[in-house]
Amino acid sequence: MLEKLKGRNIRIVDTTLRDGEQTAGVVFSNLEKLRIAKMLDEIGVHQIEAGIPIMGGDEQEAVKQICRAGLKASIMGWNRPVIKDLEASLACGVDAVAISISTSDIHIEHKLRASREWVLEKMVEATRFAKKQGLYVSVNAEDASRSDMDFLITFGRAAKEAGADRLRYCDTVGVLDPFTTYENIERLIAEVGLPIEMHTHNDFGMATANALAGVLAGADWVGATVCGLGERAGNAALEEVVMALKHLFAVDLGFKTELFREIAEYVSHAAHRELPAWKPIVGSNMFAHESGIHADGALKNPKTYEAFQPEEVGLTRQIVIGKHSGTAALRAKFAEYGIALGKHEADLLLPEVRKAAVALKRPLFDKELMSIYEDMFGKRR
């Protein structure tokens, strides 16, 4: 299966500033949007979906600032298949546009209140206009995962004929599984012949898995957001996609992954959202070991319980002392304090440490550990 990835040019389009900001209750200031764009560019993101220029006001100004920032990444504006939308994107100076329209019958009938023919007509008209302006065009099939496949193929072929550069396959309500994703993307590529971008949502917790399944099937682009920020349960997480490609699929995009924790913290703060300790890749618990067996293994050889080095994503290893700790971790922790804790002392100390951790319902702080140690051995030192 991984043979299919050899020689492939996989690229990332980050939509933190568009789909990420569409998270209910999230608003980025223009300064924050510019800062996030610069951080994404520094990390190595290939294309940044910077916002929706037709909104005007601060949104339009933020996109203009990002376009003027001299970034290496392509800058994309999101649009409906409406000429005025595209003119607003052009006025900002973007070099790429996403032209988005629904392709599922439920959306066409109930949201657009139109027909399949109308959808094709509007998409083709907008695509042709954008290409005449020299823009890179991604045609977005919104709700593609619930669309009739035959119509989706017709839609993709019409987009290709109109000059589109790629087709964004949107799992808008996150209903895909990796097996169905693989089958759908493989068929689309075979029958349409356009580069495919995966745009997956996380309603069933499979956004990253579905994005990767699409890549295995032949998709060359993955849409993602920092920490998986996005509407409802969010999108595929940038850091998860990049690290999975690198360590599970042997596809190194050359990203500065050591900056992942920094940008995760910044975006979380700007979005007023918690960065969970258990967040894959960038959560503080990724390299925190408390269980006696795990801590002992990690101390002997980190590879026993770590998939990659913490420094690779901007984190550090932590040996946490609590209810589940063992003597090996306890002795290692006291070595950090410059105290060579003997095996007999560790055996005596551990029950008291565990008792305190249960009473406090958390791991112990350094001062609490030292206090227990001094109470037990202070007179002997």
Image (cartoon, rainbow, N blue to C red):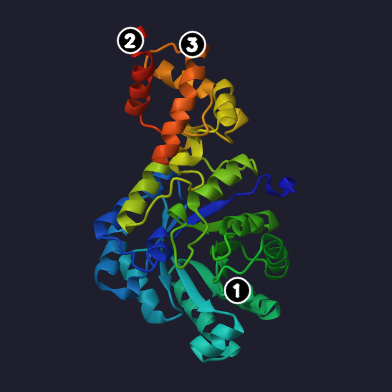
User: The residue under label 1 is which amino acid type?
Assistant: Ala
Please give the name of the residue rendered at 67% of the width and 80% of the height, measured from the top-left corner.
Answer: 148
In the image, 86 versus 114, the foreground residue is 114
Q: In the image, is residue 339 above or below residue 186?
A: above
First in residue order: circle 1 vs circle 2: 1
Q: In the image, is residue 262 above or below residue 348?
A: below
Label 2 sits on a secondary structure element that is helix
Label 1 sits on a secondary structure element that is helix
**Numbered disc in front, either 1 or 2:** 2
CA gap between label 2 and label 3 equals 16 Å
Res 294 label: none
Which residue has dot 3 on it? 342
Q: Callout 1: 10 Å neighbours few (<14), some, many (20+)?
A: many
Label 3 sits on a secondary structure element that is loop
In the image, 283 versus 64, the foreground residue is 283
**Numbered disc in front, either 3 or 1:** 3
Which residue has dot 2 on it? 379
Q: Position of residue 259 (x, y in %)?
A: 41, 40
Please give the name of the residue rendered at 53% of the width and 91% of the height, measured from the top-left corner.
Answer: 114
First in residue order: circle 2 vs circle 3: 3
Which residue has dot 1 on it? 144
In the current view of this chain or complex, which residue is farthest to the top?
Answer: 380
Residue 70 appears in the figure: no
CA gap between label 1 and label 2 equals 72 Å
